Image (cartoon, rainbow, N blue to C red):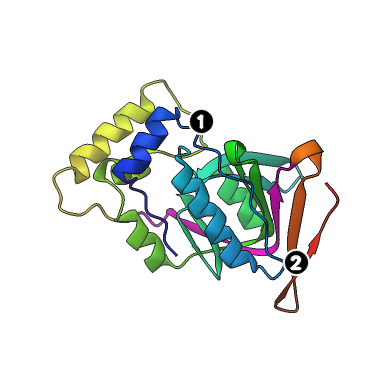
Amino acid sequence: MLFPTVMTLFEKLRCLFTFGQGVALPLPTIPENSQPDALFKLWFEDASKSGILLPEAMSVSSCDSQGQPSSRMVLLKDFDEKGFVFYTNYGSRKSHDLSNNNKVALLFHWGVLQRQIRIEGIVEKVTEQESADYFHSRDKGSQIGAWASKQSQKLTHDSELTERMSHFQSEYGNKEEVPHPKFWGGWRVKPHYIEFWQGRANRLHDRVCFEKQDGQWHNFKLHP
């Protein structure tokens, strides 16, 4: 499932009138026989409908070769039964971390809905064709910016990024298609644990968990 990046007019108005914080919905009951894929899709749709600004924003946590964890916010760009996909520069710190240690954690937090989703799994690179297809779906400025940014590397001087952007603008700005850089692409998080957290009164929150064992999902609940 590819998530749309364009908000409808109604969603834009709701986002505007709630200052991007969204509209709280009634607290739902989580069905006992829920499957994680379907439940994630339902919750994501609820977050989108509420008017929350960037409901696809998620924290990605990785560890380097020394075991030092780090987290950053990225945007979810695709989701299906195979996993959760985001895109980045393969030379970035997170890509170096993930190349050396494929264990990863994701977190979605939608405060106004009193919901969060915690995901643990391993990553793999998406295919080059998937990366190229998504790259060419972006606006041209973002495509050129991907060439200009040596993501996570130190700037040699304050104007370096501006100079690089001007260089690649001159090189690709008048071309019909910006080539897909081989150093830029997607990571797919293949989950083996997903927890749906729903806030409740008196801090008696629901924690509905799914764990994959031998290729099958098993669910259980945790004390809050």
**x, y percentage for residue 135?**
34, 55
**Image: 158 above or below 139:** above
Identify the residue at the far front of this view: 26
Q: Which span is picked out in magenta?
A: 180-200
Q: Is residue 16 left or right of residue 169?
A: right
Q: Residue at x 20, y 54 (%)?
A: 177
Q: Quadrant of residue 166?
A: top left
Q: Residue placed at 86% from the left, 51% from the top?
A: 223
Type of amino acid at the residue the image marks with label 2: Glu
**Magenta stretch encompasses residue 222:** no
Q: Residues within 10 Å of mark 1 (few under 14, many from 20)?
A: few
**Viewer-nearest residue: 38 or 216:** 38
Q: Secondary structure at mark 1?
A: loop
Give the labeled residue for mark 1. Answer: 154
Q: List x then y, in percent, for residue 215.
A: 70, 78
Residue tagged 2: 211
Tell me if 164 is positioned left or right of 218 in this view.
Answer: left
Q: Amino acid at mark 1?
A: Lys
The answer to whether one can see residue 91 in this image is: no
- Residue drawn at x 64%, y 69% as measured from the top left: 35
Nearest to the observer: residue 98 or residue 11: 11
The one of 55 and 91 positioned closer to us in this rendering: 55
Residue 193 falls within the magenta-colored stretch: yes
The residue sitting at 49% across, 36% down in the picture is: 22
